[in-house]
Structures are given as structure tokens and as C-alpha cells.
Image (spheres, helix red, strand yellow):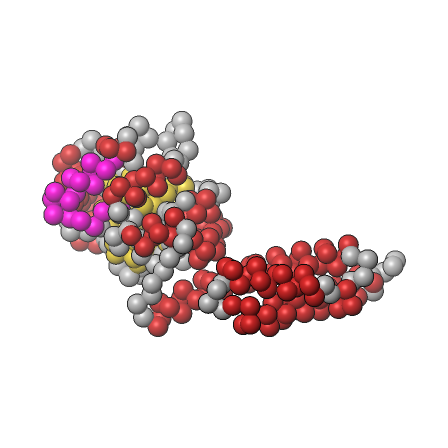
Amino acid sequence: MSSAAQMSREAKAVHLGATALGAGPAVVIGGGPEAEPDARWITLRTQGGGREAREAIEEARSDWPGALLVEPFRVADLRWIGEHADGVVVGGAWLRDVRLVREAATLGLPVVVQRGSAATLVEWLAIAGQCVAEGNDQVVLCETAGRAHGVDLALMREARTRSGRPVLVALGDDAGLAAAAIAAGADGLLLAPEADAEVVRAAMEAATIVGAVVRGEIPDSVTAARAAIDRVDAVLATMLERRAELAGVIQRLKPVGGFAGRDMERERRVVAAMARRAPRLGEVRLAPVVNAVIEAGLHLAEEERGQRDQRPGR
């Protein structure tokens, strides 16, 4: 099992509504409801507090039935967060505000603690410790890019290993590092609240495909097991499409292509190599699977060659 998968199994799960962080699949938080992320979050930006904060949270809640996290602008906002949200985000700028951290922890909601751009690992983990000291063990760490530096995936891994807590990686409105973050062991991705649907979908695709490969899941129900299989099937489909593309290249390069050009000895070596990675299936069970994949690729190559031959000018 990969180190990332091992990390996944050892994390303490934190639940945001029906969404679990630290156990099961990697999650995506952020963006608007039209992209259907796993959870949403908003940042309260008004100095007015009071009614303005409550209305902002209620508006976000009205068009989103899933888990909702809220980052306060000031301590007074925590009252409304406690009443209407599923979790609270303590931004990096608030790490030195001991009162806000303590009162956020006493809400009894999961707390996402973002690392400030200048905060050390020790300082970051100390904030999680403050939440625990207030009786709240539902803490999620979040690695966040600073102004001068990008996200530190090595630090994220270290924080997760030392604390045993779920870790998110904040990517703003750019999903370019989504796959790398999940491969490094992140339990989820935190996108900007205003991230557009395309960014959210790209992040969710990376979480699905890479997560299915590197994360160790132990489903506890038929529904959860089927969802896990769906994620593995997404990887299989992606790889089968890629394999068919490469097989088509080989067919165009071989002096004798198609079924007549099959190399049965190489196919046996392919099955043997796969069996080493899938010993429970073994060569006997894998052989017909590999044969079906190869034949599907050959049929596809023949169809595409026929289509090319029928084009005008050929």
C-alpha cells in the first residue's frame, strides 16, 4: 500500500454533515452550488456583523442543502455560524486571535484551521491543540498558499502524520495542483467560495481519479462500497481509453497490424506483469480480461482505419 493510502487509513475522521473528512474518498469544498461540490463555504466580509452576517449565512444555506462552512469576520459572527452552519473556518489571519479560536472551538462544530503564510508547523498544530483544549476534537487542518510561496505539500504531509487529523489543501480558483495534492495525501481540496463550475469539476475529477488509486477505503455499507467501486471504475475507464489510444498508435506503426499482427508471447508477459500487481486475481482470471481489452482495442483500430480510408481525397 502507498504511503498516501496508509496515511488515509490512519486519519481521524471529521464529519461535515454527511461528508466525512479523513476516511473514505477525498472531498472538494468550495465553489457555487451549480457545480455540486461535496461541501461549500463562505467568508463573511462585512464589518457590520449581526444581521448582515446572519443574512449572508441564511442566503448561502437557502440554495445549498449540503454541508456549509463559514469563515467569520469577527467574533460576533460565531453566534450565527453556530446556529446555521456545519463547520467554522479559522483563516490564517486569525491564528493569533486566541479569543476567536477558543470561541470557534466551543461552538461544537468541526473547525478548519488554515495555516497562515508565515506560520510554522508547530504554530499551526498548536491552534489545533487549543481547539482540543476547549473540548472540541473535530479539527481539520488546511494548508494554504501564501503571497510569496505556493502550497507546501511536504508540510501538509508532515502535519497530517504528526497530528493524525484530516488535512485540506487550499487551491483558490486554480485546480492545477489538485491531482498533486491528492497524490501527496490530502483528504480534500478547499477551493475559493467563488470558484467557477469548471474549476470545481476539474478538482472533483482529480479527487476521483487520483484518490481511487492512492487512498485506502474501507466502506462500511453496501452504498459506500458501491460508491467506492464507481470511483475505481472511473479510473478503469480513463485508463482503458488511454490504452486504446496507445494501442491505436502501435497499430499504425506495426508492419503487420490488426488481429494478424498479434504478439501472443508479449500478451502472456502482459498478463504475468498484471498478475504481480493483482495477485488475488492471478493470471488465469486476468488472461480473459486482457484478451477482451486487446480485442476491443483492435476492433476500434480497424473501425478508425476504415473511417480514415473513407475520407475524401484518400
Residue 188 rendering spot, x and y as whole percentages = 36, 50
Residue 301 rendering spot, x and y as whole percentages = 73, 64
110 sits to left or right of 287: left
Residue 270 rendering spot, x and y as whole percentages = 61, 61
Q: Residue at x 25, y 35 (%)?
A: 124
Q: Is residue 123 above or below residue 192?
A: above
Q: Is residue 237 above or below residue 172?
A: below
Quadrant housing the N terminus:
bottom left
Q: Residue at x 34, y 59 (%)?
A: 24
Q: Residue at x 71, y 59 (%)?
A: 248
293 sits to left or right of 201: right
Residue 107 rendering spot, x and y as whole percentages = 15, 49
105 sits to left or right of 56: left
Q: Residue at x 71, y 69 (%)?
A: 299
Q: Nearer the viewer, residue 271 or 197?
A: 271
Q: Is residue 45 visible?
A: no
Q: Quadrant of residue 148?
A: top left
Q: Is residue 179 visible?
A: yes
In magenta stretch: residue 83 = no
The stretch of residues the image draws in magenta is: 124-140
